Structures are given as C-alpha cells and as structure tokens.
Image (tube, grey):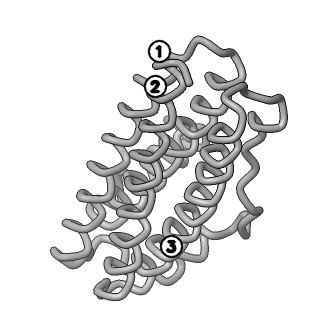
Amino acid sequence: MAATECLILNDLRTAIQMEQDGKKFYEEAARMAKDEGTREIFHYLARGEVYHIQRIQEIYDALEKDPHWQESMCEFRPPAEDPNIFSAALAKGNMGAGAADDLKALELGMQMESRSIEFYQNLARRATDPKERRFLLSLLNEERGHYNFLADYRNYLVDPADWYFVKEMGHVDGA
C-alpha cells in the first residue's frame, strides 16, 4: 500500500475517533442539559454523529480492501431528520434564560465542531483524488451545519432580541 493510501486510513481512523468523541459528548450533554430545547439539540447532534461514524467506517473498510476511491464512496446522505427539529427545540427552549451549564456545553460543542471543520478542511485540501475530496467536503459541510445549529441556538438562549432581529431581518418594517 502506498504511503498516501496509509495516510488516509490513518486520517479516517482519527475521524472515526473524533466522531465517536462527539457522539459521547452530545449524549452526555443531552443527559445533563437543564433546558429541554438544549437537550433536543444535543440528541439531534448525537444522532448525526452516529451516521458519520458508520459512513466513515464503511469508507475505511472499503479502502482497506482496495485503496482506490469509487464513485459510490462519495455519497453522503445522512438520514432525513424532522425538518422542524430546530423549531421544536425553540418551542421547548427557555428563550433568553439559558442555564450556564447548558451554554457552556453549547460553546464546547461549537469548539468541537470547529476542530472537526478544520480537520476535514485540511484533509480535503490535501486530497488528490476528486472522489476523496468530495466525500471530505461533504463531511466538512455537515460539521459546518452542526456548528451553525449550535451557534444559532446559543444565540437564541443568550440574546433572543438579536436572534429574532437576525432571523426576521427581511421582515423588519422601517419608518
């Protein structure tokens, strides 16, 4: 096996561990969350990590047998979630009164997602196979979505007036 092929396998092992750590963190954060909406957000993110782990493991196993990227390996289709998951969390959340521990967990989640974004970004930059790059960019976009989800919900808990202003910007009437 060529050195670059071993490298991606090592990177995929690291990615699996990162995703497992993320799942564990989100499950624990959900268990500890005081705000019901925050708990819902963490459960949602833990479910997302399960798919990431499974998909990365599939890619790892395939590359271990044959080091060539196949078109089917580029596919990244997380299971469809309820499109109203964020709205449901908002309805359960305690707007403007996020518990300190919940806010800290949201911030830790954001830091974790930032590290994942950087990790996948670096791998995608270094990828020589376009199929490999597509897969890594899909993971990168998932992690960005998770980061934005956490940041958005944190903003809702901390500064609901700002959150509504940002969300309703196109609907603000001027005098």
Disc 3: which residue: 90
User: Measured along the vertical axis of the image, is residue 31 above or below residue 68?
Assistant: below
Q: Which mark is residue 123?
A: 2
Kindly indicate whether the residue at mark 2 contacts the one at mark 1 (C-beta within 8 angstroms). yes
Q: Mark 1 = which residue?
A: 126
| Residue type (three-letter) at the residue carrying disc 3 | Leu
* Distance from Cα at disc 2 to Cα at disc 3: 35 Å
Residue 134 appears in which quarter of the rendering? top right
In the image, residue 108 lies at what x, y percent?
24, 58
**Label 3: few (<14), some (14–19) or many (≥20) C-alpha neighbours in 10 Å:** some
In depth, the one of 132 and 118 nearer the eye is: 132
Residue 144, relative to residue 49: is it above or below? above
SS label for mark 3: helix
Q: Secondary structure at mark 1?
A: helix
How far apart are the alpha carbons under marks 1 and 2? 5 Å
> Residue at image x 52%, y 40%?
169
Q: Residue at x 72, y 63 (%)?
A: 83
- What residue lies at 49% left-to-right and 83% top-to-bottom? 92
